[in-house]
Amino acid sequence: GVGMGMTAPVSITAFPAEDGSLQQKVKVSLRIPSQFQANPPCPSDESIKIEERQGMTIYSTQFGGYAKEVDYVNYAAKLKSALGSEAAYRKDFYFCNGYDPPMKPYGRRNEVWFVKE
């Protein structure tokens, strides 16, 4: 029952298939605003969970525009190629992040994150 407004980034955990496409299983995460972090409101919907994301080191790439699934997949492939075979990172998932409200037409920011192992 508490309105918290929109936060950034909206982070989608993507689970890649063997061919690099995304499985139809995703997890969407929203940051709880600072004023609610110590005591977040209890979700009224059972499908919503409050999780604490531990600190992590990431490999990241950034791109603009209205990001679609194909954009995240393509930039994940570019990041994978740029890192080569020497970098150790989680291969079972990666994060797709969007920072802008839907009505912002220019200067949009999107990122793909690989979590360093």
Image: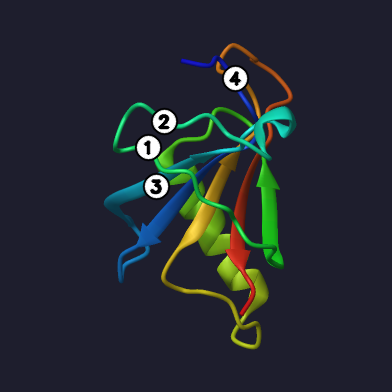
Q: Are marks 3 and 4 in contact (CB under 8 Å)?
A: no
Residue in front for this viewpoint, 117 or 73: 117
- Secondary structure state at the residue bearing disc 2: loop
Q: Is residue 110 above or below residue 104?
A: below
Mark 3 vs mark 4: in front: 4
Q: Are marks 2 and 3 in contact (CB under 8 Å)?
A: no
Q: Position of residue 4 (x, y in %)?
A: 60, 19
* Residue at the farthest top position: 103
- Secondary structure state at the residue bearing disc 3: strand
- The residue positioned 52% from the left and 74% from the top of the image is 90
Residue under numbered circle 2: 43
Neighbor class of circle 3 (other Cα within 10 Å; few <14, some 14-19, many 20+) is few
Amino acid type of the residue tagged 4 in the rendering: Met
Amino acid type of the residue tagged 1 in the rendering: Ile
Q: Position of residue 89 (x, y in %)?
A: 58, 77
Q: Is residue 5 above or below residue 58?
A: above
Which circle's residue, 2 or 3, is located before the other in the chain? 3
**Disc 3 versus disc 1: distance between alpha carbons?**
10 Å
Identify the disc placed on residue 4: 4
**Disc 1 versus disc 4: distance between alpha carbons?**
15 Å
